[in-house]
Amino acid sequence: MKKTTKSLLITSVILFTAGLLLALSSFLYVKVRGIDPYGIERNIKTPENKTVYLPEILSTSPNANFNSGTSPVPFSKIDMTSFTGDVVIRSTEEPSYLALENANTQNIAIEIQGETLVIRDIRPVGFFGIFIDENGFSFHGLRQIFGPGNSANAGRTVTVYVNSETELSQINVTSSVGDITVDGISAQNLDTKASLGDITIQNCTVSEGKITAAGSFSQITIDENEAASINVSSRFGTIHANLTSPTTQSAIFDLWVGKIRIRTDLPTTFYKLNLGTAVGKVTRNQIGVGKSLNDVSTTAKRISSSMILGSIALDFNGENEADYQAPEPEPETSVPETDEPVTAEPETAETP
C-alpha cells in the first residue's frame, strides 16, 4: 500500500470515528437535557371521525357576537384554512354543523370570532422535511426528513354543512394541499385558493360580489352558478366553466399552461369576447379561429381569457346559436279582483 493511500485511509477512519463520537454525544446530550433534536412539536394524535354541532362551537367561542347578544345569527362569515386534506362547504336543510373525517381533532381550531366561523390548523404539518403553515411551504433541513413532525394527512376531509336559510356575507377558503368543493351555497362573496389541489364551485348563488377561484397546480370547475362576476386563475392545470346564468356580466379565466374550456347557455354572440393564447389555439363552437378571438356585442356581458401555452375552447350549449330563442318571462301573479259591490254602512243619527 502506498504511503499516500495509507495516510488517506487513516485520516478517513479518524474523521469517521470523530463524527460518530460527536453524533453519539449529541444524542446523549439532548436526551439527558430533554431537548427535541428535530425542533418540531410532536403530533401523534390518532386520526378520528367526529361531528361538531353549532351549540358546541358556540360554547367554546367567548368572542362570538351571538353569545353577547349583539348579533341575531350565530355566524354570517366563514374563514377556513387547511394545510392538508380536502375541505367541503355544502348546504343542508338541517342546523349547521361540521363533519371531520380521518382528522387529528387536536390540531384543528373551530370557533366563532365576532360573526365569523373560523376553522384552521393549529400547528404546522409536514412530510419528509417539507412543512406547511399559514405562510406556505418551507424546508426545515435534512434532519426533519424522518422526524416526528411529519404528520401531514392528505386523507383528511373537513366538511362544513351550512343551513340553507343562513345568510352569508363572505366565504374565504384556503388550502395548501387538498381539494376545495363549495356546493349549493348562497353568499355575497366567495373566495377560494388552492396551491396543490382542485377547486369545484357549483350550484352557488353569489348575490352582490363575485366568485373567485385561484390555483397553482389545479383543475378548476365552475358549474351552474348564479353570479354577476366570476374570476378564475391558475398557473398549471385546466379550467372548466359552464356559464348557465343570464345574470353573469363578467367572466375572466387566466391560465399559464394547460387547457381552458368555456360553455355558455347564451349564444357566444351575446358576449364581448377577448380570448388569446401565446402558444396554442382558440376555437369557437369547435371551429379554429387562430391564437386570439376578439368580438364585440350589443350587451354589456363579456368573457375574457388569456393563456401562455395551451388551448382555449368556447362553445354554445345549444345546437345552433342562430336558432336560439330567449325563454319567455314568467307571468306576473296578481291578486284577483272581486266583483262584489261595496256597500256603505248606514249612518246612525246622533242623539241630541
Image (spheres, rainbow, N blue to C red):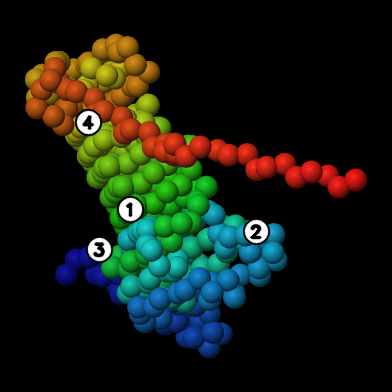
Q: Nearer the viewer, mark 3 or mark 4?
A: 4
Callout 3: 10 Å neighbours few (<14), some, many (20+)?
few
Q: Which mark is residue 265?
A: 4
Quadrant of the image occupied by residue 287: top left
Mark-to-mark CA distance, 3 and 1: 73 Å
Mark-to-mark CA distance, 3 and 4: 82 Å
Mark-to-mark CA distance, 1 and 4: 20 Å
Residue 80 image position (x, y, % from top left): 46, 57
Specify whether residue 195 is in view: no
Mark 4 residue type: Asp
Task: Residue at 35% x, 79% y: name it.
Answer: 48
Specify whether residue 316 is in view: yes
N-term mark: 1 or 4: 1
Residue 339 image position (x, y, % from top left): 44, 36
Q: Nearer the viewer, mark 2 or mark 1?
A: 2
Q: Is residue 25 above or below residue 183?
A: below
Would you name the residue on which mark 3 appears? Answer: 4
Relative to 140, is 112 on the left or the right? right
N-term mark: 3 or 1: 3
Residue 236 image position (x, y, % from top left): 26, 39
Q: Nearer the viewer, mark 2 or mark 3?
A: 2
Q: Which mark is residue 71?
A: 2
Badges 2 and 3: C-beta atoms under 8 Å apart?
no
Q: Which mark is residue 183?
A: 1
